[in-house]
Amino acid sequence: MIGLKGKGQRIARVGIVCALPEEAAALLGRKPAYDRLIRWGGARVVASGTGEVRAAAAAEALVADGCTALLSFGTAGALCPSAYPGMLLLPEEIHAHRGVSRFVDRVWRARVLARLAPGHAIHSGALFTAGGPVATGAAKAALAISTGSIAVDMETAAVAAVAAAHGLPHLAVRAVVDGAHETLPGATLAAITDQGQIRPHRFLLALARSPGDLGPSLRLAFAFRTALGQLRDVARLAQDILCLA
C-alpha cells in the first residue's frame, strides 16, 4: 500500500505517464514536449508517446528521477458496450496481452474514488493493455470476452510492470474515447505517428482513398475532446491525491 502523508508515513513523489501531450495537458494546462519530465505540484509528468516500450522507458526515467509511485493517466477505448465515450475508469486490475495481471494500489485508488464519485460515474472494471491498436468492433468484442476487461489502452500494463519491478505502488486513471461497437477510421489510423500525432498530409491522402472516413474521424475527434474534458475534471478535483504531495 502506498505511504500517505502523516505521522510515521513517508511521502511519495508520483511519476505520471501520459502517452499523448494532449493527455498531459489535461494535468499541466499546456502541451509539453515529448520525453520531458515536467513538474505538476509535487509530481512529475511525462508524455511518453504511444505503446508499451515508450511507456516503460518513461516510467523508468521517472523512477530514476526519484519517483516512488507511478500513475498511468490518459484515454482508452471501450471493449464492453457499457463503456461509453467520456466514461471515467479507475480500474482495480490491469491485464497485459502477455498474460500478466496486476492490481493497482487499493488505498490510493479508494482516495481518488472518494474524491471523484460525488460528481462522476466511475467504473472499476479491468483495463487491458494491447500490443497495438484494437481497431474494429469485432476485435473489441473478442477481447472483452477473452480478457473480461471493460476498456483497452497500449501503455498501462507497461507502467504497472515497472512499478512492480521496483516495488512501487501503481494507479491508473483513464477516460474512454471510442465506443465498443465503433471501428476506428482507417484515415485516422494511417495519419497517426508513434507519438500519437496526426499528420495532416497523411490524413488527407488516406481520406482521398476512403472519403467515407471523414464522418467517423470527426466523431472520434469530438469523443477525444470529451474524454480530455473528463481528465481535466479529474486533475482539477483530485490533484492533491494524484500527486500525494
Image: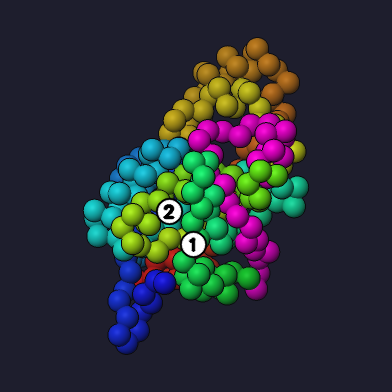
Q: Give me the residue at 66% from left, 43% from top.
A: 146
Residue 23 or 92: which is nearer the viewer? 92
Marks 1/2: CA–CA distance: 8 Å
Residue 226 or 76: which is nearer the viewer? 76
Residue 201, horizontal then vertical, whole percent: 52, 18
The quarter of the displayed image where residue 57 is located:
top left
The quarter of the displayed image where residue 122 is located:
bottom right
Give the mark nearest the N terminus, 1 or 2.
1
Q: Give the range drawn in magenta.
A: 118-144
Which quadrant does the N terminus fall into?
bottom left
Q: Is residue 133 magenta?
A: yes
Quick one: which residue is furthest to the bottom in this view? Answer: 7
The quarter of the displayed image where residue 47 is located:
top left
Task: Please give left or right for residue 60 compared with residue 128 in the image.
Answer: left
Residue 68, horizontal then vertical, whole percent: 31, 63
> From what the image shows, is residue 8 above or below residue 124?
below
Q: Give me the residue at 72% from left, 29% from top.
A: 215
Disc number at residue 104? Answer: 1
Residue 190, horizontal then vertical, whole percent: 55, 22
Number of marks? 2
Kind of residue sitting beneath label 1: Val
Disc number at residue 160? Answer: 2
Q: Give me the residue at 71% from left, 47% from top.
A: 80
Residue 126, horizontal then vertical, whole percent: 60, 55
Would residue 136 be visible to someone looking at this image? yes
Kind of residue sitting beneath label 2: Ala
Task: Please give left or right for residue 23 compared with residue 136 in the image.
Answer: left
- Marks 1/2 in contact by CB < 8 Å: the verdict is yes
Could you classify mark 2 by the number of other residues whose Cα lies within 10 Å: few (under 14), some (14-19), or many (20 or more)? many
